[in-house]
Amino acid sequence: PFISTLLGLIVLAVSPVLVLTLMVLLMITIVGIPLGLILLFIYPVVLFLAFAFGGMAVGDLVFNRKGGQAGLGLRAISFLVALAAIVALGMIPVIGWLIVSIVLCIGLGAWSVAIFSRHNDRIATTDDAV
């Protein structure tokens, strides 16, 4: 979780500049104008999903103490309990924003690790076939 959080912090710091730059570059062409607007509107959705993934990661970390593959019921209950706890802790005036930001960074980092590990698995499978 620590490496995931650090990677999520880096992604969170770089992503607004990347999204705005890509949006401006897309809006140069006629075809890119709708794509740029879609990119602008999908960014908050990605942040919301990253927060949800962070809640699921925290729930798995707290409730799945065996370390094995958790079933759907355990994952759903742990996700809901962890998300409720995160939202309740987020209401604390001084440290609430810090807790929510850490969960967001965990989610972004976990998502980034999952995307890049799939890419590396696909490359390794392609290299093995040759």
Image (cartoon, grey):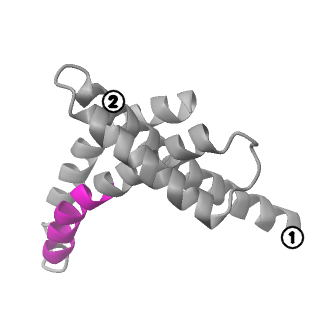
Seen in the picture, residue 15 relative to 10 is either above or below; the reply is: below
What residue is shown at x 15% (from left), y 76% (from top)?
Answer: 34
Left or right: residue 39 versus residue 112 is left
Say which quadrant the C terminus sits in: bottom right
In this orientation, which residue lies closer to the viewer: 27 or 112? 112
Q: Is residue 26 magenta?
A: no
Q: Residues within 10 Å of mark 1 (few under 14, many from 20)?
A: few
Q: Looking at the image, is mark 1 or mark 2 earlier in the sequence?
A: 2
Q: Which mark is residue 68?
A: none
Dominant secondary structure of the residues highlighted in magenta in the image: helix
What residue is shown at x 14% (from left), y 57% (from top)?
Answer: 24
What residue is shown at x 17% (from left), y 64% (from top)?
Answer: 41
Q: Identify the residue under disc 2.
A: 99
Residue 100 percent across, percent down from the top left = 31, 36
Separation of residues labelled 1 and 2 (CA atoms): 45 Å
Residue 91 percent across, percent down from the top left = 21, 34
Q: Which contiguous range is marked in magenta? A: 33-46
Q: Quadrant of residue 92?
A: top left
Q: Identify the residue under disc 1.
A: 129
Q: Quadrant of residue 125?
A: bottom right
Say which quadrant the N terminus sits in: top right
What residue is shown at x 55% (from left), y 56% (from top)?
Answer: 115
Seen in the picture, residue 64 relative to 100 is either above or below; the reply is: below
In this orientation, which residue lies closer to the viewer: 30 or 74? 74
Residue 114 percent across, percent down from the top left = 58, 53
Q: Residues within 10 Å of mark 2 (few under 14, many from 20)?
A: some
